[in-house]
Amino acid sequence: MRDEEDILGTFSDLRRETLHVWIDRGWLAPERSVEGYQFQEIDVARIRLIREFRTELELDEDALDVILPLLDQVHGLRRELHRLAEAVSAQPVEIRAQIAASLAAKK
């Protein structure tokens, strides 16, 4: 876990006010403790992504309000698909063959 000061030191161009706006908008969801915000590595990656969207792609706040939740949904669906693939892989060969045949028939 990284605290707010560490985050601001890592991203020297990021102002505390901007970081708090991103948290208030729901773009970041760090843990809150009595010491302040605590950021996981996934939060750090998200900050990099937001900065890239804002600087390189020049996306505004309204666009990010749409894009970031959509990205979250895509990642959530990928996790669920991975879990489903693992569950199918754990099945006996006959069941996997039936699933494969069923999927092929629906193409």
Image: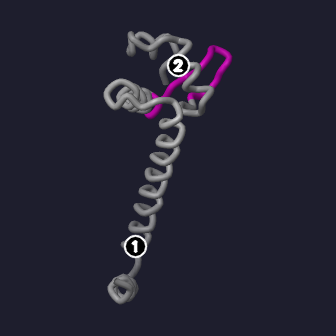
Instruction: Say what secondary structure mark 1 lies in.
Output: loop
Look at the picture and state if 24 lies above or below 13. below
Numbered mark located on residue 55 in the image: none
31 in the magenta segment: yes
Q: Quadrant of the C terminus?
A: bottom left
Q: Quadrant of residue 97?
A: bottom left
What residue did someone put label 1 on? 90
User: Which residue sits at x=55%, y=25%?
Assistant: 22
52 horizontally vs 2: left or right: left
Look at the picture and state if 49 lies above or below 86. above
Look at the picture and state if 84 lies above or below 69. below
Q: Earlier in the sequence, mark 1 or mark 2?
A: 2
User: Considering depth in this image, is 1 or 22 the residue closer to the camera?
Assistant: 22
Numbered mark located on residue 19 in the image: 2
Q: Quadrant of residue 33?
A: top right
Amino acid type for the residue under numbered disc 1: Ala
User: Which residue sits at x=41%, y=78%?
Assistant: 91
Amino acid type for the residue under numbered disc 2: Leu
Q: Which range is magenta?
A: 30-43
Instruction: Say what secondary structure mark 2 lies in.
Output: helix
Asked if the residues shown at circle 1 and circle 2 are in contact, with their CB atoms under 8 angstroms apart, the answer is: no
